[in-house]
Image (cartoon, grey):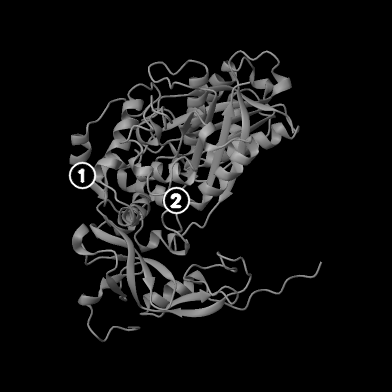
Amino acid sequence: MRESWVVGAASNRFGKMSETAREAATRVSLAAIRSAGLSPKDIGYTFVSNAFGIAEHQAHVGPLINGGLGIPDVPSATIESACSSSSAGLHEAFVQVAGGFIDAALVVGSEKLSHLDTLAATSYFAIAADYAFETKNGATFPGLYATIASAYRSAYPTTPEMFGAIAIKNHANGARNPHAHFQREITMETYLQSPIIASPFRLYDCCPFSDGAAAIVVAAKEFVPSPVSEPLVIRASARAGGITEMQDRPDLLALPATQTAGAKAFRQAHLAPQDIDFAEVHDCFTLAEALALEDLGFVPRGTGARAAMDGLTVRDGKLPINPSGGLKAKGHPVSATGVSQVVEVFEQFNGLAKGREVPHTETALTHNVGATGGSCSVHIFSRR
Amino acid sequence: MPSESPPAASHTISEWVKSYEDGGPLRGFRCPHCGFITATWGLACPRCGTVARDEHALSANGTVVAFTLLTVPGDEFLNDAPYVYAVVELEGGGRITGWMPTVRTADGVAIGERVRFRPSYKPGVQFVRESEVAPTVSGA
């Protein structure tokens, strides 16, 4: 297997885009390719994610992006894995590049939902659950995680302020990220006074519906002998699945897909959780960050919710989590999220994360979950 | 390569929906190998992977193991919020999710509370608190 690097990365500002997902994807793709010092003609394959393209009456967007980049002859594939779509795309790119099939791949995720109202967007998000056995019975995306949260609060001593501390931390980080949807800090008072969306979740427990696009370039080491930026060495690229339906899970308080993908990734990288300097984890809800910390082995079970309050996961803590602001504050344009986590690692490694730098940037982990845990990607990166 | 025999005939998702919409029973499956009971459609057991499932009638009675009060619903429940969405552990085995239109506050139900399936003209599997149920409910 060839050593493979992330050699270029770009993101637009998440929030509300005036242009289509296709236009935004093409724009960030060109920016990522240029940031790698490459040309579109160097790309051997494009992996595109645009899970809700149907909301823009558009499918099969890969050839349109490649056409817009002047490389219509380059193959593309659309990768859909709900919220983990573009990290699944990264995994496929890694397989192709590390396996020697191509020298460089473009991975891009883009989403636009802001032209829909809250009701329509809520319904779109819910279709990643099991329609017949969850959504049709009243579930929404926040509702599914909130249901897990009720069980978590019943099992472990948990206060609203613990979830609030996660939200406050991620908003503080997002306030320093020019790509973030929400670039303002919040207080505990703001958090506690925000309305209940799905008990026990308040508004500030939930990530926003965001538009956005992000892209990276994955290349074989030998293809870029003189990289123009500090590349991310892909030490591990792991995917796992898990039972989608909450009703069939043996344990409501864990996401087996995260546990499996995390364990696989640490084995691939020959590393352990204590070797990771910082991580971008899938915090679609505050509880989700807590579960991720536990399922990845960073903290014991039942203690993830208090990690932010205890200072462990703040930017200058022992294990900074979501220095980008996470899904919570940076935003969650579904198909762009996985790649945008890698963009944050790229910016941290290259000194581009001005104002939100973490203390140590030798090794980083990204964790991206599809819906409520039906699928998961974990990647580990290090410097050369 | 010899083809594997298809699993014994089992109900479809449409038949599962029609059954509860018609008043029950809640249809499910039981794994002949590990005994796992589920309402979820499939051709194999999601726990042990055995490619065989027996038809199994689920109980209409159960206990709430997790829940949320939803104030922002999806489009099919636009006029029903707030309502509770719950995971219910059924008597005799198996879990199922459903909604509780009669519970409109977060303290209106608790983990451990006994609930019962209630047939309804509205969509989805509905549960009500046992204390609300008349003794003649189908499947009870």
Subunit ID for the residue under disc 2? A
Looking at this view, name the residue that lies furthest to the bottom.
B136
Which residue type carries mark 1? Answer: Pro
Residue A133 lies in quadrant: bottom left
Residue B133 lies in quadrant: bottom left
Question: Is the Cβ of the residue at disc 1 closer than 8 Å to that at disc 2?
Answer: no
Q: Which residue is mark 1?
A: A195
Residue A48 point in image, percent of width and height: 57, 35
Q: CA distance from mark 1 to mark 2?
A: 23 Å
Q: Which mark is residue A136?
A: none
Label 1 neighbourhood size at 10 Å, few (<14), some (14-19), many (20+)? some
* Secondary structure under the numbered disc 1 in the rendered image: loop
Does A274 appear above or below B12? Answer: above
Residue A206 lies in quadrant: top left
Whether labels 1 and 2 share one chain: yes
Does B8 appear above or below A162? Answer: below
Q: A349 left or right of A198?
A: right
Which is nearer the N-term, disc 1 or disc 2? 1
Q: Which residue is mark 2?
A: A372
Q: Residue at left 35%, top 53%?
A: A152
Q: A250 left or right of A45?
A: left
Which residue type carries mark 2? Answer: Thr
Q: Is residue A65 visible?
A: no
